[in-house]
Amino acid sequence: MPADTNATTGPAALQGLATEPGVPKPDPILVGDKIKRSFGGLTAVDVGHIEVQRGAITALIGPNGAGKTTLFNLLTGFDKPDSGTWSFNDQSLSGVPAFKVARRGMVRTFQLTKVLAKLTVIENMRLGATGQRGEKFLSALFRPLWKSQEDEITRRADDLLARFKLDTKREDFAGSLSGGQRKLLEMARALMVDPELVMLDEPMAGVNPALKQSLLGRVKSLREDGRTVLFVEHDMDMVRDISDWVIVMAQGEIVAEGTPAQVMADERVIDAYLGAHHDTDLTELDHEAVQAQAEAELDEEEAKHDD
């Protein structure tokens, strides 16, 4: 996927934009309006407007409990908002389940990796591909119908494993990988869908220093391929190193936007981390309660869908 050289696309198009929350972008790939999510009496997300620039790397930062991961879950169909609308490539994603969001070209990874530990690395990669004829019951009985497609999927998987320096782990069980290697595998598997937008939830969490540079390089390479990246991260060195644009959340709201240099000097950001907002962050127990309720509600919705 070659990078677009259009003047309205990519990092260059962000130069000179205002630093106000929800500032319009020249070529947004993802747009959200009035997105709200509450758990009991606690408002976890209350985002008036958000836009993500196509072809750029955007960081979503904020103190613990700011609502970053909850917003990720809402945008990607892993949770449902109380209200709000959002679109990807001008197509509404409101009410679209997570697996269909991924098929449309918007994929995400998780803070806690979701690799299938008892499958090998190459098997995990093959599962990432969509539209496999061999997954249908009748077709599965006749190998000639899907053998050539599976061979092509395997070639693509091997190319990605080599690119992510996981080819030597090809036949290892995913459960035997280190935390950093699992992050790399999850990112590589996400690319099996050939997505336009890759959303990374704390890609550096739990990664040892030896693998951090490798991960940073892989994230940068996504932009070089012409893809868009939106990531949640607490590592400010990473944010400064690779971000083209930064969106700051506090208490569920977007409080500031801008280039890394602009954001780091913004009084609203300093306040969000160290001032008034800092005093009202969620406690660890509050955060666990919110997460538990979200998971319970999602399970209930899945049960209704299964019925």
Image (tube, rainbow, N blue to C red):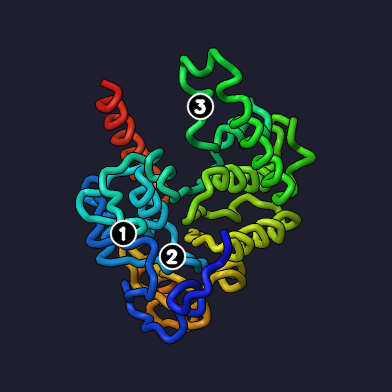
Mark 1, residues whose alpha carbon is within 10 Å: few (<14), some, or many (≥20)? few
Dot 2 or dot 3, earlier in sequence: 2
92 vs 160, left or right, is left
Which residue is disc 1 drawn over? 90
At horizontal 37% and vertical 74% (from top left) the residue drawn is 25
Residue most extreme to the right: 168
In front: label 2 or label 3: 3
Q: For the residues labelled 1 and 2, say whether their Cβ atoms are less than 8 Å apart.
A: no
* Residue 78, percent from left and from top: 37, 42
First of labels 1, 3 by sequence position = 1
Circle 1 sits in a helix, a strand or a loop, which is it? loop
The disc placed on residue 133 is 3
Residue type, label 2? Gly
- Number of disc labels: 3
Residue at the location (33% across, 30% down)? 299
* Inter-mark Cα distance, 2 to 3: 43 Å
The residue tagged 2 is 62
Q: Quadrant of residue 171?
A: top right
Rendered image quadrant of residue 26: bottom left
Residue 142 visible in image = yes
Which three-letter amino acid code belongs to the residue tagged 1?
Answer: Asp
- Quick one: which residue is furthest to the bottom in this view? 16
Residue at 58 percent across and 63 percent down: it is 2
Q: Position of residue 57 (x, y in %)?
A: 52, 66
